[in-house]
Image (spheres, rainbow, N blue to C red):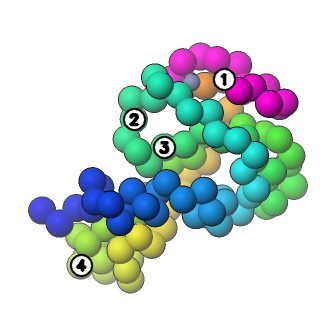
């Protein structure tokens, strides 16, 4: 197995806020760090200014699919760490804990 899901390189990429901002073409204001988020490390909930849709202060659930060695071998990506796909959804409530996500600061 050559999966990098647990590797420090993968975690460095997935924990970098700048990467999430580049992938989503947005400016991230804050993350909802949810202790009930039982999904994998590739899912984030954040409030952001979305440059593509010109929307300010919306909350998103985002899931990033980052290339690992297997996907490079399979020629789905050119290098490890490359973004293959990002899914983003507008949300008003956290899907894990049910908290209402307001447009002002909640932390
Ligand atoms: Zn939550």
The residue sitting at 48% across, 43% down in the picture is 43
Residue range of the region highlighted in magenta in the rendering: 95-107
How far apart marks 2 and 4 lie (CA) works out to: 26 Å
The residue sitting at 46% across, 63% down in the picture is 13
How would you classify the magenta stretch by its main secondary structure?
Answer: loop
Residue at numbered disc 2: 39
Q: Residues within 10 Å of mark 3 (few under 14, many from 20)?
A: some
Q: Earlier in the sequence, mark 1 or mark 4?
A: 4
Above-or-below relation of 89 to 17: above
SS at badge 1: loop
Q: Earlier in the sequence, mark 2 or mark 4?
A: 2
Residue 63: image location, x then y, percent: 50, 48
9 sits to left or right of 96: left
Residue 100 found in image quarter: top right
Residue 105: image location, x then y, percent: 80, 30
SS at badge 4: helix
Q: Earlier in the sequence, mark 4 or mark 3?
A: 3
Q: Residues within 10 Å of mark 4 (few under 14, many from 20)?
A: few
Residue 96: image location, x then y, percent: 51, 23
Residue at numbered disc 1: 93
SS at badge 3: strand
Q: Quadrant of the N terminus?
A: bottom left
Above-or-below relation of 55 to 10: above
Q: Nearer the viewer, mark 2 or mark 4?
A: 2
Considering every residue shown, the one lying at the far left of the view is 1
Tags 2 and 4 in contact by the CB under 8 Å rule? no
Residue at numbered disc 3: 43
Q: Nearer the viewer, mark 4 or mark 3?
A: 3
Q: Earlier in the sequence, mark 2 or mark 1?
A: 2
Residue at numbered disc 4: 73
- Whether residue 104 is in magenta: the answer is yes
Q: Earlier in the sequence, mark 3 or mark 1?
A: 3
């Amino acid at each position: 197995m050559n999966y990098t899901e647990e590797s420090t390189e993968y975690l460095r990429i997935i924990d970098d806020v700048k990467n999430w901002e580049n992938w989503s073409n947005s400016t991230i204001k804050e993350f909802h760090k949810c202790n009930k988020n039982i999904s994998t490390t590739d899912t984030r909930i954040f409030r952001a200014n979305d440059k593509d849709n010109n929307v300010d202060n919306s909350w998103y659930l985002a899931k990033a699919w980052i290339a690992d060695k297997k996907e490079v071998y399979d020629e789905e990506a050119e290098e490890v760490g490359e973004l293959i796909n990002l899914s983003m959804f507008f949300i008003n409530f956290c899907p894990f804990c049910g908290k209402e996500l307001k447009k002002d600061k909640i932390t």
